[in-house]
Image (cartoon, grey):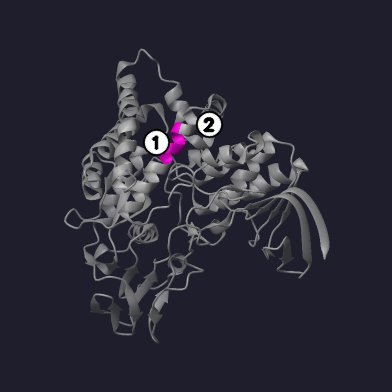
Amino acid sequence: MAELETDYLIVGAGAMGMAFADTLLSESDARMIIVDRHAKPGGHWNMAYPFVRLHQPASFYGVASRELSQGKKDEVGLNKGLMDLSTGAEVSSYFDDVMRQRFLPSGRVDYYPMCDWSGDGAFTSSLSGERFKVRYKKLVDATLLTASIPSEHKPPYEIGKGVHFMPPNGLPALRQKPEGYVIIGGGKTAVDSILFLLESGAKADDIQWIIPRDPWMLLRENAQPLPEYFERVFGTQADYMKSMAEAETVEDLFDRLEACGYVVRLDRDVRPQMFHAATISELELATIRQVKNIIRMGHVTALEENRILLTGGEIETTPGNLHIDCSAGIARLAKDWVTPKVFEGNIIRPLTVRSYMPVFSGSLIAYLDVHYDDEDEKNRLSQPVAIPNTLEDFVAMSLGAMMNQYNWSQDKTLRRWIRENRLDGFTKLTSEIDHDDKSKMAIMGRIRDTAPKAVGNLMKLAGLA
């Protein structure tokens, strides 16, 4: 067994692990060993379906030191007029470039791909079988937020003989039209698959969509980090704060959020029961609404040659239909901690500390570890934010994110670092407001004045007050 020694052992070269390592490289002189099971850095991007794209602007994704976005608006397609969304291939290539052009040339990073971490200070090469033992000062477990990938996902239902079935990864390889397409799942993967089919020439009438639970979705137009979008982005943010401050119930909260354009739903006559933070443009929403054959009878329990069994009944199918599994789940904690701490002794757990922004979270956690000595203070500044599934989770997520944001704002040095971190997305934009611009200042005033009321009311909605 080969023996290694390092300051930080980082397990997982996914987006959060890479963002953590990048900031550590910028803010310290520490040495790192990065261990990952994939052949290339990027985590789940290595196994994603070919037509996947970021669903938020590329300008605040990746690592802090290197731009991912092309800095352009899309001029065609369903994201027209909005900031560019990198493809899965571009994201995968980007993380590979970061490793080869920044991390490894630094001389402070050693990278061990295609290795299995055993959790006891040791890892093993999947190719050679060679085993390694690491002495480290700190262990960074960047494997805790795991996304269920369609190509690796075991469907939670039985698949009978004669059923034409595949994950979304197989769609670009189709060479013959099936009788119809049956999309299974109500999340972002299902939306992506339907958009791919429709943009590639499939007919909406040939698509049957099984949705166990309808989702509330975010509009991408509200997340554009450019001055020309200021009034739209921050005006909606102000309305979001007002909704949280005044809502009497969780249901009332989502009614208000829909009324102000913060969230949207697929069918105006069906009330969503799920929030996974999927983001969609107005053009994409109009496109998926072309699919009219929607089944809302619960979860699939079995696919048979001529019928589909669901928790709420059954429907007919045929051997000629192509059944596409989009039921893979969202990112979840890989272990059953109720209230995990980010910092605990010599263990660091990169978790989401701001809503919708995992890579910013990884970067900020690295900064805290380098510049703050007191563990309690580091944990106070990095309270994990809930990853939403239910509507109640949205309340907990919003409350946690607002509490973190307030704590950061009270620390002058940290506030300045956040403003200059490109992964933050919006703080720099707000810091450059001309104070003579009465319209913009009024919007920011609404946010500032409503935030304390929003926090107090969210605590009531969450049952904490």
Q: CA distance from mark 2 to mark 1?
A: 18 Å
Q: What residue sits right under mark 1 in the picture?
A: 224
Residue bearing the label numbered 2: 418
Q: Position of residue 179 (x, y in %)?
A: 30, 75
Q: Residue at x 30, y 33 (%)?
A: 453
Quarter of the image for residue 373 reads top right
Residue ranking furthest to the bottom: 161
* Crowding near the residue tagged with mark 2, few <14, some 14–19, many ≥20 C-alpha atoms within 10 Å: many
Which three-letter amino acid code belongs to the residue tagged 1? Gln
Q: Residue at 32% across / 50% down in the picture?
A: 217
**Numbered disc 2: secondary structure:** helix
Farthest-out residue, right:
2
Give the vertical position of 439 relative to 345 (above or below): above
Rendered location of residue 242, percent (x, y):
26, 34
**Name of the residue lying farthest toward the left:** 269
For the residues bearing labels 2 and 1, Cβ distance under 8 angstroms: no
* In the image: residue 281, left or right of residue 387: left
| Residue sitting nearer the eye, 250 or 263 | 250
Tell me how many marks there are.
2
Q: Which residues are magenta?
A: 401-406
Expressed as whole percent of the image width and height from the top left, the position of residue 130 reads: 78, 67
Q: Residue at point 27% right, 70% down? A: 298
Residue 445's disc number: none
Looking at the image, which residue sits at the far front?
465
Q: Quadrant of the N terminus?
A: bottom right
